[in-house]
């Protein structure tokens, strides 16, 4: 079977995106797994030329954000046209993205808008860590929003929708026929019978039952239980509780996966690292894992015929 063809966007040109893309392209495992085509703002080009053109510190914030956003748009268009089987995105800077005319908090929201799909943001460890038998997978019910907005935005429909997208993604993209999914509580100790809030009893528990989820379980235990094999994924109610869990457990080997798209999209588990760009010290490990996982999902969907 031929290697899947993947589009790779270079991210913010002021950051480490171009150098970790170059490192991933040179990796033997990547070369064996996928055919990479680097995408810049102007289109799909030969891989050497656009990487060489994108140099740290050359562009203003707005120019950098515009270039990064245009590259993602090009990658999406190629995937929707069937010219590539998946996309891998290097990190972009959210302030720069906005300054460049893209009013989206991040890749996830941009991808949802461009495809018209209900999506979910998953951070997935690519292998077990810390001696645990299972790799941790965390899905965010709400993504890039202020903490004060979470109680308003975290509705039963949001939880049920995240569960549906997660279940389909785990089945179709990760090969789990009957995925076991837990819901992380919102409040300490899942509210402790109402002492620390009623949301877990009155909102999360009924939503979990409706969605076929286990829980809600307290944040200080549910992720450990998942790593020990009790669950295949955990849905977290807000950004930092989920992101902290996955990054403490598997930083550098975790991959951001946008579930619900008509094509696989992955990215590394870190940001632009503007402070070290161009110094030759950026660790490409997560970018390499992102390419390998995207290629694996693309191969799986070839065989199953599912998107």
Image (spheres, rainbow, N blue to C red):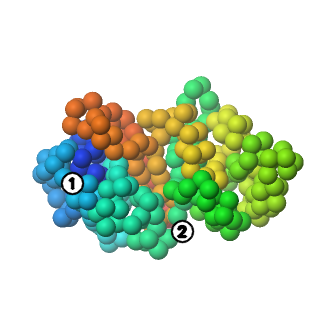
Towards the viewer: 42 or 96: 96
Residue closest to the far right: 193
Provide the secondary structure element on which disc 2 rests: loop
Q: Name the image quarter holding residue 270.
A: top left
Towards the viewer: 9 or 174: 9
Q: Is residue 153 visible?
A: yes
Name the residue that disc number 1 marks. Answer: 60
Task: Say if 196 sits above or below 204 in the image.
Answer: above
Indicate left or right for 149 with 111 as reference: right
Indicate left or right for 181 with 297 as reference: right
Q: Residue at x 77, y 56 (%)?
A: 199
Name the residue that disc number 2 marks. Answer: 118
Indicate left or right for 198 with 17 as reference: right
Front tag of 1 and 2: 1
Q: Residue at x 22, y 32 (%)?
A: 279
Q: Residue at x 33, y 36 (%)?
A: 284
Question: Percent from the top left, x then y, of residue 50?
Answer: 16, 53
Question: Percent from the top left, x then y, of residue 298?
Answer: 41, 56
Q: Residue at x 68, y 68 (%)?
A: 157
């Amino acid at each position: 079977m031929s290697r899947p063809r993947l589009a790779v966007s270079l991210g913010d040109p002021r950051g480490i995106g171009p150098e970790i893309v170059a490192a991933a392209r040179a990796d033997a495992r990547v070369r064996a797994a996928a055919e990479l085509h680097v995408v810049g703002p102007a289109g799909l080009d030969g891989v050497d030329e656009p990487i060489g053109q994108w140099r740290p510190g050359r562009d203003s914030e707005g120019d950098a954000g515009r270039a990064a956003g245009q590259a993602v748009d090009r990658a999406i268009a190629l995937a929707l046209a069937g010219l590539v089987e998946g996309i891998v995105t290097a990190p972009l800077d959210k302030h720069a993205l906005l300054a460049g005319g893209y009013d989206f908090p991040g890749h996830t929201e941009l991808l949802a808008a461009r495809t018209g799909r209900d999506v979910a943001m998953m951070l997935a460890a690519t292998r077990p860590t810390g001696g645990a038998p299972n790799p941790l997978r965390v899905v965010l019910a709400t993504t890039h929003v202020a903490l004060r907005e979470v109680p308003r935005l975290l509705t039963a429909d949001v939880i049920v929708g995240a569960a549906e997208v997660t279940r389909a993604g785990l089945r179709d993209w990760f090969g789990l026929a009957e995925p076991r999914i837990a819901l992380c509580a919102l409040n300490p100790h899942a509210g402790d019978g109402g002492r620390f809030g009623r949301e877990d009893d009155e909102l999360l528990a009924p939503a979990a039952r409706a969605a076929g989820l286990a829980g809600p379980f307290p944040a200080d235990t549910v992720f450990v239980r998942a790593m020990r094999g009790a669950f295949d994924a955990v849905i977290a109610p807000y950004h930092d509780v989920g992101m902290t869990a996955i990054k403490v457990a598997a930083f550098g080997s975790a991959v951001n996966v946008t579930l619900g798209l008509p094509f696989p999209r992955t990215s590394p588990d870190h940001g632009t690292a503007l402070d070290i760009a161009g110094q030759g010290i950026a660790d490409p490990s997560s970018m390499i894992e992102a390419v390998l996982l995207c290629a694996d999902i693309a191969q799986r969907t070839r065989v199953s015929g599912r998107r």
